Image: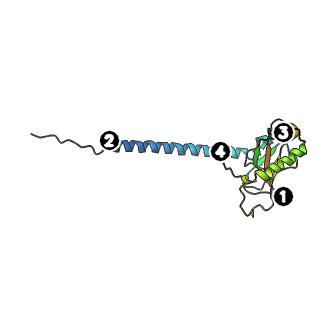
Amino acid sequence: MTVPIERVSRWAGGDILLLVVAIILSVIVAALFAFSAIVSIGTAREADARICASFELADLREGDCVSELPQYVPTDFTVVDCAQPHAAEFVFFVDQTEAVDSNLGDRALAALADAYCDTTFTYRINISADVDDLPNAAVNGYVGSRATFAGGTRFQCFLFNTTGEPLVGAYYLDDGV
C-alpha cells in the first residue's frame, strides 16, 4: 500500500504574517513618497506662478523677492525670481494689533516696525555668521498707515542692501516657527 506523502508548507504562519506586514509597509512608504512628490511639485508650480505677478503688501509670503522697495508703502509689490537681482526679500511678518497703541502716528508706527524687524526678527534670515555675503544688509519694516494698522495690519519685514545694490539669491530661512 502506498501512503500519500504529506506536503509540508515552506511557509510557516509567522513567515506569511511577516511578508504581509512588509508588503503593507512598502505600500504605505510608496504612498507617502508619492504624496510628498505631488505636494512638492504643486508648491513649485505655485511659486513659479507668483513670479512677475503683483501683490498687495498683506498678500506677500515669506521668502517672496520683490523688484523694488520704495520708501513709502506702495499699493502693489512685483514678485520676482530670487535667483535674479532684486531690491528686497520679504522675510517676516508679525501681527501686533493687540500689543501696540493704535493711536500712534504713521511715523511712530514706521519707526516701531523698523525696530521690531531689525532687532527681533533678524534671526529668521539665512546669512552666514561672518556676514561676508551681505555686509550692508538691513531689515526694514512696513506697516502701511495708521488707518490700516488699526484695522489689524501687521508689521512686514524686508531684507535689503543699504548701499542700494540688488540682492541675488534667497535669504529667508523657514525655520517652521
> Of the residues under marks 2 and 4, which one precedes in the sequence?
2
Amino acid found under the numbered disc labelled 3? Phe
Real-space Cα distance between discs 2 and 4?
45 Å
In this rendering, the answer to whether 33 lies above or below 123 is above
Q: Quadrant of residue 39?
A: top right
Q: Horizontal and vertical percent for residue 138?
A: 81, 56
Q: Horizontal and vertical percent for residue 2?
A: 11, 40
Q: Horizontal and vertical percent for residue 75?
A: 84, 41
Residue 69 vs residue 175, the one in the foreground: 175
Residue on which disc 4 sits: 43
Q: For the residue carrying disc 4, how many other residues have a C-alpha within 10 Å: few (<14), some (14-19), or many (20+)?
A: few
Quadrant of the image for the N terminus? top left
Q: Quadrant of residue 102?
A: top right
Real-space Cα distance between discs 3 and 2?
68 Å
Residue on which disc 2 sits: 13
> Of the numbered discs in the image, which one, if any, rests on residue 162?
1
Residue 128 vs residue 88, the one in the foreground: 128
Real-space Cα distance between discs 1 and 4?
32 Å
Q: Which of the two discs, 1 and 3, sits closer to the camera?
A: 3
Residue 32 vs residue 42, the one in the foreground: 32
Q: Which residue is pictured at 79% across the width and 50% down the height?
A: 117
> Of the residues under marks 1 and 4, which one precedes in the sequence?
4
Q: For the residue carrying disc 3, how many other residues have a C-alpha within 10 Å: few (<14), some (14-19), or many (20+)?
A: many
Is 84 on the left or on the right of 44, as rendered? right
Q: For the residue carrying disc 2, how many other residues have a C-alpha within 10 Å: few (<14), some (14-19), or many (20+)?
A: few
Q: Which of the two discs, 2 and 4, sits closer to the camera?
A: 2
Amino acid found under the numbered disc labelled 2? Gly
Amino acid found under the numbered disc labelled 1? Thr
> Of the numbered discs in the image, which one, if any, rests on residue 149?
3
For mark 3, give the secondary structure: helix
